[in-house]
Amino acid sequence: MSTFPHSIIIEEQGLRDGLQSEKILIPTEKKIEFANRLVEAGLRRIQLTAFVHPKFVPQMSDAEEVFAGVDKTKNVIFSALVLNMKGLERAIKAGATHLSISISASDTHSRKNTNMSLLEALKEFKDMVREAKKAQITVRGGIQCAFGCRYEGKIAKGHVLDLARQHIDLGVDELALADSTGMGNPLAMKEMMTNILAMTKDMPVILHLHDTEGKGLANMLAAMETGVSYFDTAFGGLGGCPFIKGATGNISTEDTTYMLSQMNIQTGIDIVKIAQISRELEGLLGKQLSGKMHHIILENS
Ligand code: ZN
């Protein structure tokens, strides 16, 4: 008897987490085209971009244009990441209705990522969530480095649960935990997510997994067994936080979807259409992406 959910909701992160640390700038028109093709491939949640300082993340400097350019006539949640009040103001102006607002569980990562200590970031985070709610935006609250930090090592579970409690009390609509460094393991996933799901009740809980240490899909399965049914993935396995050394590769949309389809778990995603995007992007970036199935699927079709 399977203990896994019957269907999984995937949020595609390739255009944001995937592209953000790539030095070769992808033209705005291309990003918009990719987003529209992701919709065609069946994705219903897409993180499009980040409203962050263009000096620190040049690839995201066209956030407004990308946001304005995508086809919003389908029933798709287009989201974006914001890290500070300035970014939130830009996102509101751009007409965002769903935002990912996150803080890091690690003080050192927070300082490097946002120039704020965890305490300062927490204060800003609370102000941002309140402002976003005032603007009637659906807020996905996020905790980065929830399963470990390259600078600080293991992050205490109690600390993450405390941050999650603060998110819930603030009234976030969804809660995301990120294994930004890929340091999590299946046992840690099980323990953490069992605790988190007991706190969140009906609220959507999303896991954002990196495959840096090769445990991405194993971690996903462990979390699915606790009842988590929302996951972030990136086409081709693209991705990695520019501020975390060696944080390459989200779990690949194609690899994840393929495994789930073999397990008779629905995602509604057309893997061939995603693989075509990954292969085209490999050409644009001049490198091979770390996922597996985008090669195998196209070579066999
Ligand atoms: Zn990430």
Image: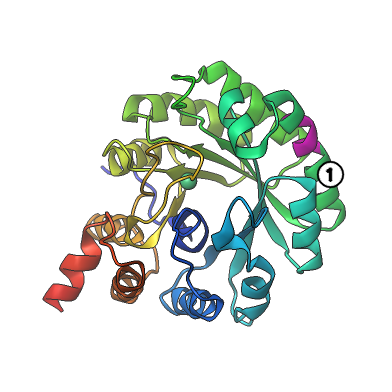
Position of residue 64 measured from the top left corner of the image (x, y, whole percent): 69, 70
Position of residue 50 measured from the top left corner of the image (x, y, whole percent): 62, 57
Q: How is the image coloured?
A: rainbow
Position of residue 259 measured from the top left corner of the image (x, y, whole percent): 25, 55
Q: Is residue 18 left or right of residue 97?
A: left
Q: Is residue 217 left or right of residue 300?
A: right
Q: Is residue 111 left or right of residue 216?
A: right
State the residue at coordinates (47%, 69%).
43
Magenta stretch bounds: 122-126
Observer-nearest residue: 287 or 175?
287
Instruction: Identify the residue under disc 1.
Output: 130
State the residue at coordinates (59%, 79%).
74
207, above or below 26, in the image: above
Quarter of the image with the N terminus is top left
Quarter of the image with the C terminus is bottom left
Position of residue 138 measured from the top left corner of the image (x, y, whole percent): 72, 55
168, above or below 133, in the image: above
Q: What SS does tag 1 mark?
A: helix
State the residue at coordinates (30%, 44%).
217
Observer-nearest residue: 235 or 56?
56
Q: Main secondary structure of the magenta part?
A: helix
Residue 48 seen from this side: no
Residue 91 seen from this side: yes
